């Protein structure tokens, strides 16, 4: 009998002790205050995402891996054909340009004519607009426009 009372006493103490838990209710007020704080880093990211993406044109950058010998060849090739405007003639409303290269070789050209890799786009009163087609160090074709002015002597 004593054993039964002791067992019942322990059971009652266990039931009473377990049922008397204090429950702390979690309030959302603390979280709302934290959410009201300004997130500066988030604003910076949003601003960065709204901006237009930054693009780098690889063709305009110098290649750090090109040896100086190749670079000299490429620049020498660009300077190979250098033309100068010697004169402009006009006949029946059509202009004809007289061009001369380094070797004093002369060319008589009209708009639309080609001299090697150079195309004549326009002939003005005292200038000629030309377009040179060159191959850059990446192996891509590049078109550069230049204006040759008539030298007054």
Image (cartoon, helix red, strand yellow):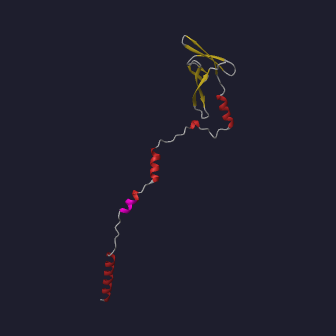
**Residue under the image location 65 percent in, 29 percent down:** 77
Above or below residue 3? Residue 18 is above
Viewer-closest of 6 and 127? 127
Relative to 139, is 28 above or below? below
**Quarter occupied by residue 34:** bottom left
Instruction: Identify whether 97 is placed above or below 132.
Output: above
- Please state the horizontal and vertical placement of residue 105, each as a whole percent of the image: 67, 18
Residue 32 forms part of the magenta stretch? yes
Q: Which residue: 31% across, 78% down? A: 16
For the point 45% across and 47% down, which residue is it? Answer: 47
Q: Is residue 132 magenta?
A: no
Q: Quadrant of the C terminus?
A: top right
Q: Nearer the viewer, residue 54 or 75?
A: 54
Looking at the image, residue 9 sits to the left or right of residue 146; the answer is left
Q: Which residues are magenta?
A: 29-33
Q: In which quadrant of the rendered view does residue 118 lie? A: top right
Specify the quadrant of the image occupied by residue 27: bottom left
- Side (left or right) of 123 relative to 31: right
Q: How many marks?
A: 0
Where residue 122 appears, as percent x and y from the top left, is: 55, 20
**Looking at the image, which residue sits at the far bottom?**
2
In the image, taking residue 7 as reference, residue 108 lies left or right, namely right
Horizontal and vertical percent for residue 149?
61, 22
- Secondary structure predominantly adopted by residues drawn in magenta: helix
Q: Point out the residue furthest to the front here.
A: 153
> Where, quadrant-wise, is the N terminus in this rendering?
bottom left
**Residue 63's x, y, as percent?**
62, 39
At 58% from the left edge and 36% from the top edge, which residue is drawn?
A: 60
């Amino acid at each position: 009998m004593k054993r039964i009372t002791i067992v019942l006493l322990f059971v009652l103490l266990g039931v009473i002790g377990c049922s008397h838990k204090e429950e702390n209710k979690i309030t959302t007020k603390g979280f709302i205050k934290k959410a009201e704080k300004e997130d500066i880093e988030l604003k910076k990211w949003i601003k960065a995402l709204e901006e237009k993406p930054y693009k780098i044109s690889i063709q305009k950058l110098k290649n750090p891996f090109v040896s100086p010998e190749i670079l000299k060849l490429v620049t020498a090739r660009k300077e190979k054909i250098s033309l100068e405007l010697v004169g402009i003639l006009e006949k029946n409303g059509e202009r004809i340009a007289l061009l001369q290269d380094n070797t004093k070789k002369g060319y008589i050209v009209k708009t639309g004519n080609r001299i090697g890799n150079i195309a004549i786009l326009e002939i003005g009163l005292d200038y000629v607009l030309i377009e040179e087609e060159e191959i850059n160090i990446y192996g891509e074709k590049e078109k550069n426009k230049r204006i040759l002015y008539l030298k007054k002597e």
